[in-house]
Image (spheres, rainbow, N blue to C red):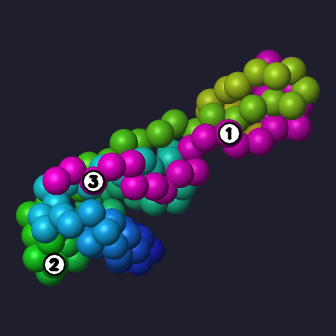
């Protein structure tokens, strides 16, 4: 379960941002998690609760997760399509010249104080 390690990085970054801005209490952290990021949102929130409650700054703070869809782009026909449904092969032209455009994110979107 790598979600615990990710939570430690989130806490580190939130603590740093709070210190830089003179924040003494965080109410929530909003995360953008991509559909194919390999992060399991339920595991992340479970780990968050355990780790965040050990920090005065974050005790009781919620972790809100926005799940972002995985979207691929086809370089041959220029169309976007849902990655999970179709994989690396473009459903419009059958090309394999595609790349993941979104859906691999693991990022802090905002910190609510």
- Which residue has dot 1 on it? 101
Task: Give the residue displayed 67% in from the left and 26% down from the top.
Answer: 81
Quarter-of-image position of residue 103 = top right
Marks 3/1: CA–CA distance: 25 Å
Taking depth in this image into account, of 27 and 73 the one nearest to the observer is 27
Marks 2/3: CA–CA distance: 15 Å
Q: Does the magenta stretch include residue 50?
A: no
- Which residue has dot 2 on it? 55
Q: What x and y, as percent, mark residue 11?
A: 31, 72
Whichever of labels 1 and 2 marks the residue nearer the N terminus, that label is 2
- Which mark identifies residue 111? 3
Q: What element carries label 1?
A: strand
| Disc 1: CA contacts within 10 A as few (<14), some (14-19) or many (>=20) | some
| Disc 2: CA contacts within 10 A as few (<14), some (14-19) or many (>=20) | few
Task: Give the residue displayed 46% in from the left and 55% down from the top.
Answer: 107
For the view shown, which residue lies furthest in the bottom direction?
54
Q: What element carries label 2?
A: loop
* Circles 1 and 2: CB atoms closer than 8 Å: no
Magenta region: which residues? 89-113
Q: What x and y, as percent, mark residue 52?
A: 19, 72
Where 14 sits versus 103, above or below? below
């Amino acid at each position: 379960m790598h979600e615990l390690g990710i939570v430690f990085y989130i806490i580190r970054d939130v603590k740093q941002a709070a210190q830089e801005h003179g924040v003494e209490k965080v109410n929530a952290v909003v995360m953008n998690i991509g559909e194919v990021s390999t992060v399991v949102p339920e595991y992340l929130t479970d780990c968050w609760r355990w780790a965040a409650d050990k920090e005065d700054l974050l005790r009781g703070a919620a972790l809100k997760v926005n799940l972002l869809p995985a979207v691929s782009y086809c370089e041959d026909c220029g169309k976007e399509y849902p990655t999970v449904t179709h994989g690396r092969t473009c459903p419009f032209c059958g090309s394999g010249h595609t790349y993941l455009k979104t859906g691999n994110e693991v990022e802090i979107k905002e910190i609510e104080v």
